[in-house]
Amino acid sequence: MTYDIFLYLALGAMAGGFINGLAGTGTALFALGFYLVVLQPITAVFIVAFMSVLAGLQGLWIVRAEILSQPKRLLRFLIPGLCGVSLGVMLLDHINAGTLRLAIGGLLIVYGGYFSMRAALPAFERPTPWLDSLVGLLGGILGGTASVSGALPQMWVSLRPWTKSETRAVLQPFNVAILSTTVVVLAFKGAFDATAQTALLVTVPLGLIAAQIGIAVFRRLSDTGFRRLLILLTLAMGLGIMASELF
């Protein structure tokens, strides 16, 4: 492994691990650009998904009480989301994934830009179990077709006046479950090769350390601060999707 490869892998691992520890999402947004410089796309996506799952398991531990206290809320998102992944993969032959990613990117930019400039955040308090399930299903479908499973759930939960731990107790396990499915699928497609194994020797320890730093910062955020962070990440995700498709 050359110094340049090591450097890009290390930077990606630290950036992706930190944001996962901080927000419970966004690993691909911050890490994939580094990995794609030195790895083939399928290997880069595999590494990002694998790292997201490992870092996500640490994040799950800090909100375990909230997950266990409201399991039905999580399952409303998670079960439809897992079903949606299979539907998304089936739709791959009938949908232009690039066009879909552009549309989602535009939606994220409009949403994130609008609420980033508002002094008061939205406060959608009414229970909406059917809408929650629909968002989870659409998130899974978008994960299977365009690799953006967390986009809609992230937008939706940032509208809710939940505590930061309650919000994370939905987003983190949702992302871990969807990305675990992605890891298994990519492994069956041969992504877990010698190159990936070597890259993981660098990315795993650095990513886990960076995730712990992110978790430490998360603990210091207020509930409102965390919601604003998710909205800013939504804007950044939209810009990242648009850039990856247009340039």
Image (cartoon, rainbow, N blue to C red):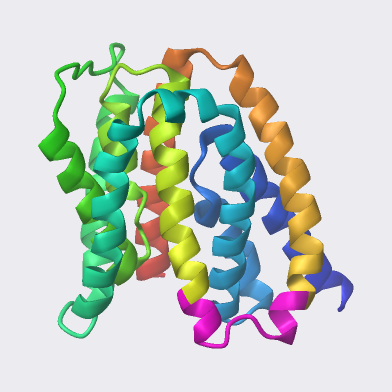
Q: From the viewer's perspective, tell me whether residue 60 is left or right of residue 208.
A: left
Kindly identify the residue that appears in the image at 11 percent across and 38 percent down: 130
Kindly identify the residue that appears in the image at 60 percent across and 25 percent down: 218
Residue 214 sits in quarter: top right
Q: Which residues are magenta?
A: 185-197
Where residue 7 appears, as percent x and y from the top left, is: 81, 63
| Magenta span main SS | helix
Which part of the image, by quadrant, shows the C terminus? bottom left
Q: Nearer the viewer, residue 133 or 17?
A: 133
Above or below 189: residue 206: above
Q: From the viewer's perspective, tell me whether residue 102 is left or right of residue 190.
A: left
Q: From the viewer's perspective, tell me whether residue 40 is left or right of residue 87.
A: right
Q: Nearer the viewer, residue 90 or 64?
A: 64
Q: Is residue 20 visible?
A: yes
Which part of the image, by quadrant, shows the N terminus? bottom right
Where residue 148 appears, as percent x and y from the top left, is: 35, 58
